[in-house]
C-alpha cells in the first residue's frame, strides 16, 4: 500500500546518503580530474570540492521525501496509476531522491565516475517520464514498466559514449535525454486524448516553466559567463539544481491529479 511509501523512501534515503558520505571519505569515486569544473564554482580543498553546487542538490532529496509524505498521508483515492500501483509511487519518490546524490557526485568529487553519475541523474528522470507515460497509454504491467525504464537508461548511456557526430562536437547523451523527455510528453498528450482523463494541467505547466527557467540559468553558471563568480556562495548552477528539484515536485502533483472516472 501507499501508506508505507514515506517510511520506505526515508529509510533508503538515509542509507544512500550514508553510503555516499563513505564514498567521499574513502575516495571510491576515484581521483579528481576536473570533471564538472566548467560549472563556475571554484574548487575547494574540502570533502565537497564544489560545496554550493553539491549541497544545492538537496532540493531533489527534499522533493522526493515530500512527495512520499504526501502520498502516504493522502486521504483522496483517484483512479490512476499512482494510487492503484504502489510500486510506481515508491519508484518515483525514490528516483527523485536519488537525483540528489547522483548529481552531487560530480560536483563533490570532480571525477569521471562522478560525472557518469551526474549524467545518469538526468537519464533517471527522463526514463521515468517516458516509461510511466507509455505504461499508462498501453496499460502495461509493472514488470514491463521496469523493463522499459532500464532499457531507456541503457540506451541513453550508450548514446553518452558518443561526443562527436560526423566530426562535429555533439554530445549524444544530452540529445538522448532531450529526445526521451519529448517522447514522454508526446505520450502524455496521446494518453490524454485516448483516455479523456481529468488532470490538472497547471502542474504540467508549472513543471515545464520551472525546467525552462532552470535551463536558462544553467547557461549563467558556466566558466567565462559574465554572471560567473567562482568564489561566490551564490552559484547559478545551484539555482539550476533547485529549480529542477521544484519541477520534479510539480510533475508529481500532475501525476497524482489524474482521474479517469470523472469523464
Image (cartoon, helix red, strand yellow):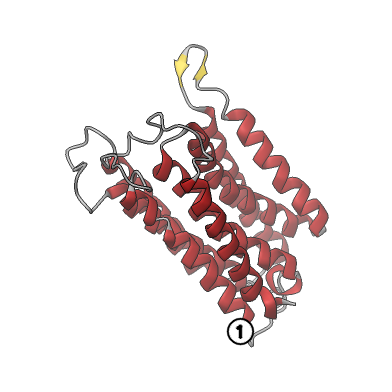
Name the image quarter holding residue 162.
Answer: top right
Along the viewing direction, whichever of 45 and 204 lies nearer the viewer: 45
The answer to whether residue 200 of the structure is visible from this angle is no
Outermost residue on the front side: it is 26
Q: Residue at x 62, y 69 (%)?
A: 11
Outermost residue on the top side: it is 167
Above or below, 261 against 238 in this view is below
Q: Is residue 207 left or right of residue 225?
A: right
Outermost residue on the bottom side: it is 75
Give the mark count.
1
Along the viewing direction, whichever of 82 and 118 lies nearer the viewer: 118
The answer to whether residue 110 of the structure is visible from this angle is yes
Above or below, 210 against 46 in this view is below
Q: Residue at x 18, y 43 (%)?
A: 229
Q: Is residue 61 left or right of residue 141?
A: left
Name the image quarter holding residue 239.
Answer: bottom left
Q: Quadrant of the N terminus?
A: bottom right
Residue 37 at what x, y percent from top left?
34, 35
Above or below, 260 against 30 in this view is below
Q: Quadrant of the C terminus?
A: bottom right
Say which element carries label 1: loop
Q: Residue at x 50, y 61 (%)?
A: 248
Residue 58 at what x, y percent from top left?
43, 60
**Which residue corresponds to mark 1?**
73
Q: Is residue 252 left or right of residue 149?
A: left
Amino acid at each position: 500500500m501507499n501508506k508505507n511509501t514515506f517510511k520506505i523512501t526515508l529509510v533508503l534515503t538515509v542509507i544512500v546518503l550514508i553510503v555516499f558520505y563513505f564514498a567521499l571519505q574513502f575516495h571510491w569515486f576515484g581521483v579528481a580530474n576536473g570533471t564538472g569544473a566548467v560549472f563556475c564554482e571554484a574548487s575547494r580543498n574540502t570533502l565537497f570540492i564544489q560545496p554550493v553546487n553539491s549541497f544545492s542538490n538537496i532540493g531533489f532529496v527534499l522533493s522526493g521525501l515530500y512527495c512520499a509524505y504526501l502520498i502516504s498521508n493522502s486521504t483522496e483515492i483517484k483512479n490512476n496509476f499512482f494510487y492503484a500501483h504502489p510500486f510506481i509511487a515508491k519508484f518515483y519518490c525514490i528516483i527523485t531522491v536519488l537525483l540528489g546524490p547522483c548529481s552531487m557526485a560530480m560536483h563533490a568529487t570532480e571525477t569521471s565516475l562522478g560525472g557518469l553519475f551526474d549524467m545518469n541523474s538526468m537519464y533517471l528522470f527522463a526514463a521515468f517520464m517516458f516509461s510511466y507515460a507509455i505504461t499508462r497509454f498501453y496499460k502495461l504491467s509493472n514488470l514491463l514498466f521496469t523493463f522499459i525504464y532500464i532499457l531507456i537508461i541503457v540506451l541513453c548511456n550508450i548514446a553518452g559514449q558518443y561526443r562527436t557526430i560526423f566530426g562535429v562536437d555533439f554530445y549524444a547523451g544530452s540529445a538522448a535525454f532531450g529526445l526521451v523527455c519529448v517522447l514522454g510528453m508526446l505520450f502524455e498528450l496521446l494518453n490524454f486524448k485516448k483516455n479523456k482523463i481529468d488532470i490538472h494541467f497547471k502542474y504540467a505547466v508549472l513543471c515545464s516553466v520551472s525546467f525552462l527557467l532552470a535551463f536558462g540559468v544553467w547557461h549563467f553558471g558556466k566558466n567565462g559567463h559574465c554572471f560567473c563568480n567562482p568564489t561566490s556562495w551564490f552559484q547559478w548552477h545551484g539555482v539550476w539544481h533547485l529549480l529542477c528539484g521544484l519541477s520534479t515536485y510539480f510533475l508529481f502533483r500532475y501525476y497524482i491529479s489524474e482521474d479517469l472516472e470523472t469523464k
